[in-house]
Image (cartoon, grey):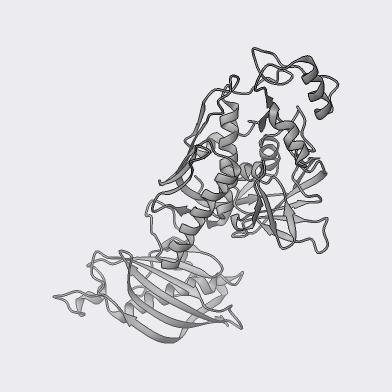
């Protein structure tokens, strides 16, 4: 999986009819800044409102996932979202001049092709993965539906479908690495059964449905009169069903288990509504949009509860945002006051730095030499340097500024820091930076426990 966030280099537009609304719309993918996330914009509505792709805004799961936010309602978002997840694109604005993305051929392949034409590009920001710390489950025993998200330092999905149909046996699909999506899943089309067609049509759905954008599966053998009625519902001069294939007009499948693969595609798209890329093993038995969304809600709830604890996680296998060389370039400190080894996270409001404490620290020569304890003032200095990187990141030319620590309040030391400890420093702005003045809360952690905390004020001064 990509460690850095991605967007696209240029805009690209697709056009087509919406599956359920039947409305022809133009959809344009546009580049977006780091930490922007995935957003939809209804440019056909007054004020051109923007809707975040977030599970909190799901308003309908009738044969598709619909979101509504800020007065912008967008139907059937899952195929577009699956393409973005499959290509690991984090930041994008999706403009629509209608209520629903084009259904295209009923899969995600056209979106994948368009996004690749728009040239995905890496951004200078780490992806904000949510790695599950405990299992999350959703069950609907009456419908035989069960979904689970299990802790895993990766992203995998396994899906099983079973419709008790003579033409659609139990099927399984597995994605073991996100890179498989384009070749093995993106072209798998949506599907329904013949008996559902008339009910869906009467419910005001599938107005844009066609045998060119969906696989329609028989549930029995049909008489000529029944086939004639189906042709009227579908607006086709004639439809046929082979008793051997059991699919209207004998549509060729891309894979023998195309239906299970499409359900996996739907799971990917719906779980994108958690709002962050996730690391988990997803197991889904007979999933649908309603159950996918319920699982997404549970995952987001766990994510928010985890974030309340606010303890940063350090994975030494991941490349840093700023190496010690870059920190050396940005901060004026030199030996023995270079206190930060690397920056592992940085956004507009927060920063996380790492300090590996060794027995060779110069201050251990005189600070409790027989009982080496990192001086509290050095912990604060290291925290201030971490905050200095955050403050410098707010200007386009950081090499032309000095970051000064001008205030410390409510400083507390909770636990001794000793040789062998890895200290994680996190600084967060408590208010927007104004006139070069930044107010921050800083905390230092060792093994997940707070060892030091303080409120700090920094001043950004241009070099003369």
Question: Residue 171 location in percent, x, y?
Answer: 52, 26
Residue 104 picture location, percent across and down: 74, 36
Q: Is residue 184 visible?
A: no
Q: In the displayed structure, would residue 319 be above or below residue 214?
A: below
Q: How many marks?
A: 0
Residue at position x 48%, y 62% in the image: 304
Of 428 and 260, nearer the camera is 260
- The location of residue 290, given as percent across then percent down, is 59, 46
Name the quadrant containing residue 216: top right
User: Which residue is at 84% across, 28% downward?
Assistant: 235
Which residue is nearer to you in this view: 277 or 133? Answer: 133
Which image quadrant is residue 84 in? Answer: top right
Residue at the image point whose x is 58% and y is 21% from the top: 256
In the drawing, does residue 414 fall left or right of residue 307? left
Residue 351 placed where, x, y %? Answer: 47, 68
User: Where's the C terminus, which quadrant?
Assistant: bottom right
Residue placed furthest toward the left = 370
Name the residue: 54% across, 70% down: 349
Q: Is residue 82 visible?
A: yes
Left or right of 346? Residue 134 is left
């Amino acid at each position: 999986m990509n460690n850095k966030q991605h967007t696209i280099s240029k805009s690209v537009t697709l056009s087509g009819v919406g599956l359920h609304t039947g409305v022809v719309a133009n959809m344009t993918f546009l580049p977006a800044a780091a930490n922007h996330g995935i957003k939809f914009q209804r440019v056909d509505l007054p004020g051109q409102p923007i809707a975040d792709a977030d599970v909190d805004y799901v308003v309908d799961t009738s044969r598709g996932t619909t979101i509504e936010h800020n007065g912008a309602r967008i139907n059937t978002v899952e195929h577009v979202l699956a393409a973005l997840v499959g290509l690991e694109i984090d930041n994008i604005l999706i403009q629509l001049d209608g209520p629903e993305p084009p259904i295209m051929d009923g899969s995600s392949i056209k979106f994948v092709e368009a996004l690749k034409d728009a040239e995905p590009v890496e951004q200078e920001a780490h992806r904000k993965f949510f790695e599950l710390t405990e299992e999350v489950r959703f069950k609907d025993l009456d419908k035989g539906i069960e979904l689970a998200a299990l802790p895993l330092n990766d992203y995998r999905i396994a899906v099983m479908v079973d419709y008790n149909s003579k033409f659609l046996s139990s099927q399984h699909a597995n994605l073991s690495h996100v890179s498989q999506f384009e070749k093995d899943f993106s072209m798998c089309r949506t599907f329904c059964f013949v008996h559902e067609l008339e009910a869906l049509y009467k419910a005001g759905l599938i107005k844009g449905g066609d045998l060119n954008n969906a696989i329609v599966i028989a549930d029995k053998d049909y008489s000529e009169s029944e086939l004639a009625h189906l042709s009227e519902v579908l607006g086709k001069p004639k439809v046929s069903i082979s008793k051997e294939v059991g699919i209207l007009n004998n549509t060729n499948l891309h894979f023998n288990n195309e239906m299970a693969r499409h359900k996996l595609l739907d799971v990917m798209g719906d779980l994108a509504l958690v709002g962050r890329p996730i690391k988990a093993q997803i197991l889904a038995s007979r999933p649908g949009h309603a159950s996918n969304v319920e699982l997404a809600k549970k995952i987001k709830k766990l994510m928010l509860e985890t974030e309340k604890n606010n303890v940063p996680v350090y994975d030494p296998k991941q490349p840093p945002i700023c190496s010690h060389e870059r920190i050396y370039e940005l901060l004026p400190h030199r030996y023995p006051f270079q206190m930060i080894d690397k920056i592992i996270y940085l956004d507009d409001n927060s920063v996380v730095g790492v300090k590996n404490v060794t027995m060779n620290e110069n201050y251990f020569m005189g600070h409790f030499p027989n009982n080496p304890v990192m001086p509290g003032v050095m912990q604060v200095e290291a925290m201030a340097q971490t905050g200095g990187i955050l403050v410098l990141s707010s200007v386009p030319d950081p090499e032309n500024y000095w970051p000064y620590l001008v205030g410390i309040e409510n400083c507390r030391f909770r636990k001794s820091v000793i040789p062998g400890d890895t200290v994680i420093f996190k600084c967060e702005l408590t208010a927007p930076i104004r006139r070069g003045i930044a107010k921050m809360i800083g905390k230092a952690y060792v093994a997940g426990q707070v060892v030091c905390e303080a409120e700090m004020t920094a001043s950004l001064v241009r070099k003369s």
